[in-house]
Image (cartoon, rainbow, N blue to C red):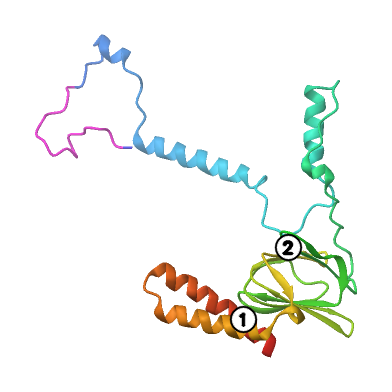
């Protein structure tokens, strides 16, 4: 906030412009200048007022969804105020089922949705537990689990229902654990473990290991390393 030229801070020897006398008409035409200290104080005050007012509308991070589509109802109310004679158009959120509210007690089952880009493996399936291959390690999810978002790595997704355990090998994706004992698992690719051919896994692991040792460019090394990591995870899933 310093002026462009000041005799105190300038390197040159150019003298400062003379101060006009009180009777000089030019002095009356000059706008009143605030001291830099006052300008800085007013700026800090405005910033503090903005931050204090913004705290009321900033939405905290959460994996929980509201039970009612509030955004859609707000849009409908605003539409009716502007165009009351025309029915409001349907928005995408109008076709989404509301998320069940958080129960007062922990339910006995975990509701799981397991989807792929091209298929839905599990839809609102009630199970006892799922174990997901998170990047931080194997994570077991039971009813009443704390709300969490986890990135998935190549590994085994286990679905436990009574004495039955169904295992899938997944390549990558995300898991969204909600506070209402719902779990949404979104994977890029997945296949049941019993459908994997161990011979092809061993063959692929050997091929990509050879490619990695003979790779000469960064791209070739990266592609070969991905193949090694994926087939190693497949081999561990079959042998483990």
**Label 2: which residue?**
116
Residue appearing at x 79%, y 44% in the figure: 93
Q: Quadrant of residue 126?
A: bottom right
Q: Quadrant of residue 160?
A: bottom right
Q: How far across and how far down the image is residue 34, in percent? A: 37, 29
Q: Is residue 9 magenta?
A: yes
Q: Nearer the viewer, residue 6 or 221?
A: 221
Pick whichever of labels 1 and 2 is earlier in the sequence: 2
Magenta part of the chain:
2-18
In this rendering, the answer to whether 57 lies above or below 18 is below
Task: Give me the C-alpha separation between circle 1 and circle 2.
Answer: 19 Å
Q: Indicate which disc residue 233 carries.
A: 1
- Quadrant, the C terminus: bottom right
Q: Nearer the viewer, residue 64 or 233?
A: 233
- Horizontally, residue 164 falls left or right of residue 226, namely right
Q: How far across and how far down the image is residue 212, in percent? A: 45, 79
In this rendering, the answer to whether 19 lies above or below 237 is above
**Are the residues flagged by discs 1 and 2 in contact, CB closer than 8 Å?**
no
In this rendering, the answer to whether 117 lies above or below 137 is above
Q: Secondary structure at mark 2?
A: loop
């Amino acid at each position: 906030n310093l002026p462009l030229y000041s005799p105190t801070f300038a390197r040159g020897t150019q003298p400062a412009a003379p101060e006009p006398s009180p009777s000089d008409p030019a002095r009356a035409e000059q706008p009143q200048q605030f001291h830099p200290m006052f300008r800085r104080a007013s700026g800090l005050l405005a910033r503090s007022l903005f931050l204090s007012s913004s705290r009321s509308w900033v939405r905290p991070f959460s994996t929980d969804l509201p039970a009612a589509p509030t955004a859609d109802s707000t849009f409908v109310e605003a539409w009716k105020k502007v165009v009351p004679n025309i029915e409001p158009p349907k928005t995408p959120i109008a076709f989404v089922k509301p998320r069940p509210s958080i129960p007062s007690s922990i339910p006995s089952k975990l509701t799981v949705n397991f989807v792929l880009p091209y298929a839905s493996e599990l839809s609102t399936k009630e199970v006892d537990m799922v174990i997901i291959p998170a990047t931080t390690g194997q994570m077991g999810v039971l009813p009443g689990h704390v709300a969490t978002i986890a990135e998935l790595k190549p590994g085994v997704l286990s679905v436990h229902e009574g004495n039955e355990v169904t295992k899938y090998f997944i390549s990558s994706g995300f898991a969204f654990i909600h506070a209402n004992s719902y779990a949404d698992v979104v994977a890029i690719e997945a296949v049941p473990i019993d459908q994997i051919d161990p011979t092809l896994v061993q063959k692929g692991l050997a091929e990509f290991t050879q490619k990695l040792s003979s790779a000469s460019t960064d791209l070739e090394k990266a592609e070969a390393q991905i193949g090694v990591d994926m087939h190693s995870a497949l081999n561990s899933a079959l042998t483990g």
